[in-house]
């Protein structure tokens, strides 16, 4: 599934300020030219609430300052824009009629339009999601105000110029539609790209509302309007359509007159292409529907000068279906001018930008249906239409494709067939069911053979298609014979991960061939077991390949796993049948009271850890965090800094201590526990000296010679900041080219405590921010949710400077692995109900999972070897073992997690404490909680929203709130003395 689009632009305000005139100009620019920034603004306000729908979610959104200030500003912006669009029209019509403009009615129209537009945008779209509702309210509020204001002037002179008989005259319906359409041109112009799915219903609703409000003001009965709508609906709709087209052309035409001149000016400017493209109207206006001359040529120049910048610009152009032509044509020019087009294509393919949605999705339907940017990009390279809307607006996307076909030009003849084949691979379900399309594969292989690295691409694609189609042991055993060409490839290969995966499949095929040729059961079993293990390892390796070829590799691995595992199972069954009956019964085990039962020779090892950071294999379920960090660091030559936030004991320290494999090559990772480093610090200079010691120590471990920190250099904060920066620069100079110095700073809240206790100066925040802006100095902070909030607060030093990554509960799959397979050779077996209940009670909280499992292993060992050793019991963790362990004493004694949450997130927050205690009684709606606690409903909703952002509570589809970790309910009851 694609990811939410990353933001690339000037810093967004945390909260729009209704008293700041510049913010009104910014909001108007978002609505008319940059709707993506309005979506990003709402997403940054609350990423989870962004996709929620319904009136309750909308009410929660209105409690957010970011949404509340937006809706305060909309009516004011409505009045300004409505006056600009409608007042001249009213004056012109009145002048043409020789009458005075009725400015009183005009003012009423603008006011009604403001209210109706905001209400319509909010109500019609509330079911689609909060983001759609708020953004729609803003957009259609502006548009609706303009539409109503214009209608009073235009409709009075044109639409309702006819007297009697208007109810049955289709021509007057057309006239009415044209008049309304001129005003609604603004609505369409604003709504395009800001909301999704409003469509004809919304447009007709606005037009109908205009008619009903305007009619009495100019002396036409409402009944006449109703008759016209229901008796001559075809004429009205035709008129509205004509008027909308006319209005869109009229309104956007004003913009294009300036934009085309602006674009032509970019062709004769002499500064660097990157700067010219960054300010080009094709990127500045996301709603442009006319091609800009020279845009494709400018994109090709930027790609040749700065490929990452060109790729970012192409990603921006792919947002607008009317400007995508420039991407295909620009890349065709760039690839034709270069000597190695395949390297350029495969340089772009793994870029995280291509794995995002084309535009910011507004609801769950968008999330489910929209393709990634990669699909659009490959479509443009291959000259193939790709539906960027995922279905609902296919006709609109098709129209944009047809309209812009005449400016697309020729595609790169050798790359286009490859792009078409790679595009087809993105549909994993289709490839899994029907296999890769062989005709496209043949065309792609034939086209690229004459290019540098073309032989590698052609042979590997053909091999992948062949290997993915094997479904029997004999075919797999023969597959390795055709893999010799891998060793003849030039080094380094174009796609080293794909080549390595193919070698891995060749090794698996060789093991299967050994199984076929062996006569000894032991040799056969060993070959199959090795093949199973290699395929399991290869499965994880393939998941890290961010290329379309991953589809075929994944299909091959999964099919081979099924075939090889089936053969291993059949061999095991055959060996079991050939055993003596007594030996077979001993191996089979039995129920807990079985006569034949074998006690282990020694206690089971206890691998679970609950205090110190862990490393693989105990570190499970954090692949998404590591890959996100790797993607952030790999997307730029100068990597961004990162914030990891979440509850205590979620595994943040373990992630920091295991970051080195994901760092850019040649980097130096320095880990520091700020809680320990600041414990005895009496100022900023002491803290910086401790960090300097850590830098020198880790550098020495890498064999880098750095001078030991001189206490005299760290005698005052001013000197310490100077000499610490010098030390970092020396460390960078000692690293290989392209390496970064990564400071992994754990327990950041200890710095906040030091600042509050006046042990550390507040200047530490600004200083750390300045360090993160040093070239190739990367900071990774780990802390509580307050650290995330600091980076989103406009008034804080960390605002907008970091990539924030949450560290939350383990997924079900990861929790199962931690419970049942904490180490590869863990011998103790768990009953399935035990695993399921541990996951349910803890919701995958890693500390709680490990604490319970640690007690379970101790309990089983105690029963097996300390209590009545002669008593038969199964060497397995059973549900009754979990009942014995998970008593009140365990919950009451587990203070490290629950007490930490209470003191960090809850204590001192009256409504939050009350709501959390009330949830200990069981799930309840916000209204029921308000009645039970006596708190006002808005306070309860605000407290519940706070608990949701802290990963402590959540709401189900029926509106009932509940604790995320069920074990916390017992802890709260015991804490309050209710048992």
Image (tube, helix red, strand yellow):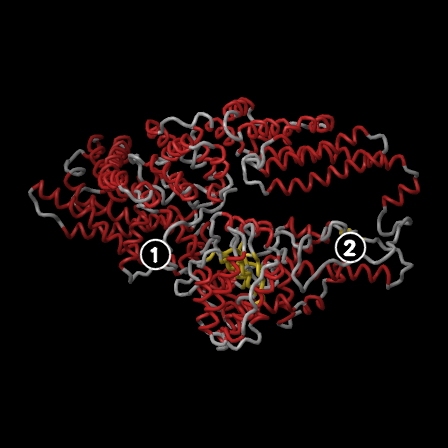
Considering depth in this image, is 639 or 540 the residue closer to the camera?
A: 639
Q: Is residue 961 visible?
A: yes
499 left or right, relative to 402: right
Point out residue 608 in the picture as x, y percentages from the top left corner. Answer: 72, 59
The circle drawn on residue 877 is: 2
With 789 as the anchor, is 573 left or right in this view? right
Label 1 and label 2: CA atoms lie apart by 56 Å
Callout 2: few (<14), some (14-19), or many (20+) C-alpha neighbours within 10 Å? many
Q: Nearer the viewer, residue 539 or 604?
A: 539
Mark linked to residue 702: none
Tags 1 and 2 touching, CB below 8 Å: no
Q: Which mark is residue 70?
A: 1
Q: Earlier in the sequence, mark 1 or mark 2?
A: 1
Which residue sits at x=46%, y=73%?
719
Residue 358 sits in which quadrant?
A: top left
Residue at the spot x=67%, y=26% of the render? Answer: 482
In this orientation, does residue 965 appear? no
Label 1 CA crowd tier, 10 Å (few <14, some 14–19, many 20+): many
Where does residue 509 sit, x and y in percent of width and height? Answer: 71, 31
Q: Look at 31% across and 39% down and name the residue there.
A: 288
Give SS at disc 1.
helix
């Amino acid at each position: 599934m694609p990811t939410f689009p990353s933001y690339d632009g000037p810093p967004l305000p945390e909260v729009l300020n209704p008293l700041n005139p510049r913010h009104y100009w910014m909001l108007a620019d978002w609505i008319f030219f940059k709707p993506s920034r309005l979506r990003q603004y709402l997403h940054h306000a609350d990423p989870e609430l962004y996709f929620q729908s319904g009136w309750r979610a909308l009410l929660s959104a209105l409690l957010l300052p970011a949404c509340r200030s937006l809706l305060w500003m909309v009516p004011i912006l409505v009045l300004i824009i409505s006056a600009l669009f409608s007042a001249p029209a009213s004056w012109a019509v009145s002048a043409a009629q020789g009458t005075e403009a009725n400015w009183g009615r005009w003012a009423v129209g603008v006011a009604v339009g403001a209210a109706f537009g905001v209400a319509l945008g909010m109500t019609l779209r509330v079911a689609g999601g909060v983001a759609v509702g708020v953004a729609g309210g803003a957009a259609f509020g502006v548009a609706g105000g303009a539409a109503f204001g214009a209608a009073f002037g235009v409709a009075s002179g044109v639409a309702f110029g006819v007297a009697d008989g208007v109810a049955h005259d289709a021509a007057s319906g057309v006239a009415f539609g044209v008049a309304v359409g001129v005003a609604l041109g603004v609505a369409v112009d604003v709504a395009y790209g800001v909301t999704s799915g409003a469509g004809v219903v919304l447009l007709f609703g606005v037009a109908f509302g205009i008619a009903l409000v305007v009619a009495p003001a100019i002396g036409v009965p409402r009944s006449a309007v109703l008759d016209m709508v229901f008796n001559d609906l075809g004429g009205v709709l035709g008129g509205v359509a004509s008027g909308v087209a006319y209005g869109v052309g009229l309104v956007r035409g004003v913009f294009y007159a300036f934009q085309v001149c602006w674009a032509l000016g970019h062709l004769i400017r002499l500064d660097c292409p990157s700067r010219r493209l960054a300010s080009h109207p094709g990127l500045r206006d996301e709603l442009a529907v006319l091609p800009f001359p020279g845009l494709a040529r400018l994109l090709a120049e930027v790609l040749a000068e700065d490929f990452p910048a060109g790729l970012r610009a192409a990603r921006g152009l792919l947002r607008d279906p009317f400007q995508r032509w420039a991407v295909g044509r620009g890349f065709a020019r760039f690839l034709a001018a270069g000597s190695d087009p395949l390297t350029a294509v495969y340089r772009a393919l793994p870029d995280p930008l291509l794995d995002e949605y084309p535009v910011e999705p507004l609801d769950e339907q968008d999330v489910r249906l929209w393709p990634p940017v990669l699909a659009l990009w490959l479509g443009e390279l291959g000259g193939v239409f790709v539906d960027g809307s995922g279905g609902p607006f296919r006709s609109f996307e098709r129209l944009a494709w047809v309209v812009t076909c005449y400016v697309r030009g020729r595609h790169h003849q050798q790359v286009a067939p490859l792009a078409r084949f790679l595009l087809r691979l993105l549909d994993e379900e289709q490839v899994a069911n029907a296999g890769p399309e062989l005709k496209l594969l043949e065309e792609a292989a034939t086209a690229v053979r004459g290019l540098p690295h073309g032989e590698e691409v052609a042979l590997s694609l053909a091999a992948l298609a062949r290997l993915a189609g094997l479904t029997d042991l004999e075919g797999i055993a023969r597959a390795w014979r055709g893999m010799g060409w891998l060793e003849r490839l030039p080094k380094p290969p174009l796609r080293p991960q794909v080549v390595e995966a193919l070698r891995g499949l060749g090794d698996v095929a060789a093991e299967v061939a050994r199984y076929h040729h062996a006569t000894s059961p032991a040799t056969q079993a060993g070959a199959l077991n090795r093949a199973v293990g290699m395929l399991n390892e290869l499965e994880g390796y393939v998941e890290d390949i961010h290329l379309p070829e991953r589809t075929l590799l994944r299909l091959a691995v999964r099919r081979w796993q099924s075939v090889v595992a089936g053969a291993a199972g059949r061999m095991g069954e055959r060996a079991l049948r050939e055993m003596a009956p007594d030996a077979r019964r001993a191996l089979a085990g039995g129920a807990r009271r079985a006569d034949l039962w074998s006690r282990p020779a020694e206690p089971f090892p206890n691998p679970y850890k609950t205090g110190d950071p862990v490393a693989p294999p105990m570190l499970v379920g954090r692949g998404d965090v590591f890959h996100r960090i790797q993607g952030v660091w790999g997307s730029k030559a100068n990597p961004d800094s990162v914030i990891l936030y979440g509850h205590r004991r979620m595994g943040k320290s373990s992630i920091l201590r295991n970051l080195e494999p994901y760092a850019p090559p040649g980097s130096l990772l320095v880990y520091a526990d700020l809680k320990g480093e600041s414990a005895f610090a009496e100022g900023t200079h002491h803290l910086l000296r401790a960090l300097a010691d850590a830098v020198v120590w880790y550098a020495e471990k890498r064999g880098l010679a750095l001078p030991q920190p001189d206490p005299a250099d760290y005698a005052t904060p001013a000197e310490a900041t100077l000499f610490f920066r010098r030390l970092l620069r020396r460390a960078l100079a000692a690293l290989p080219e392209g390496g970064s110095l990564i400071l992994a700073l754990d327990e950041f809240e200890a710095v906040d405590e030091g600042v509050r206790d006046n042990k550390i100066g507040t200047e530490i925040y600004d200083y750390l921010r300045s360090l993160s802006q040093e070239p190739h100095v990367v900071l990774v902070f780990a802390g509580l949710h307050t650290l995330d909030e600091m980076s989103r607060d406009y008034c804080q030093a960390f605002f907008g400077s970091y990539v924030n990554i949450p560290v939350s509960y383990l997924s079900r799959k990861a929790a199962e692995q931690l419970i049942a397979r904490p180490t590869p050779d863990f011998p103790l077996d768990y009953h399935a109900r035990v695993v399921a209940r541990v996951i349910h009670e803890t919701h995958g909280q890693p500390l709680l999972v490990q604490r319970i499992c640690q007690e379970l292993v101790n309990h089983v060992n105690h029963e097996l070897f300390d209590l009545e050793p002669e008593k038969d019991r199964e060497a397995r963790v059973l549900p009754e073992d979990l009942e014995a362990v998970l008593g009140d004493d365990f919950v009451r004694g587990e203070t490290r997690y629950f007490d930490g949450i209470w003191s960090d997130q809850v204590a001192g927050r009256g409504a939050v404490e009350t709501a959390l205690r009330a949830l200990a009684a069981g799930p309840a709606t916000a209204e029921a909680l308000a009645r039970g606690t006596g708190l006002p409903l808005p306070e309860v909703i605000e407290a519940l929203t706070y608990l949701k952002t802290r990963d402590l509570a959540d709401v189900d589809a029926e509106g009932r709130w509940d604790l995320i970790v069920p074990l916390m309910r017992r802890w709260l009851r015991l804490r309050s003395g209710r048992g």
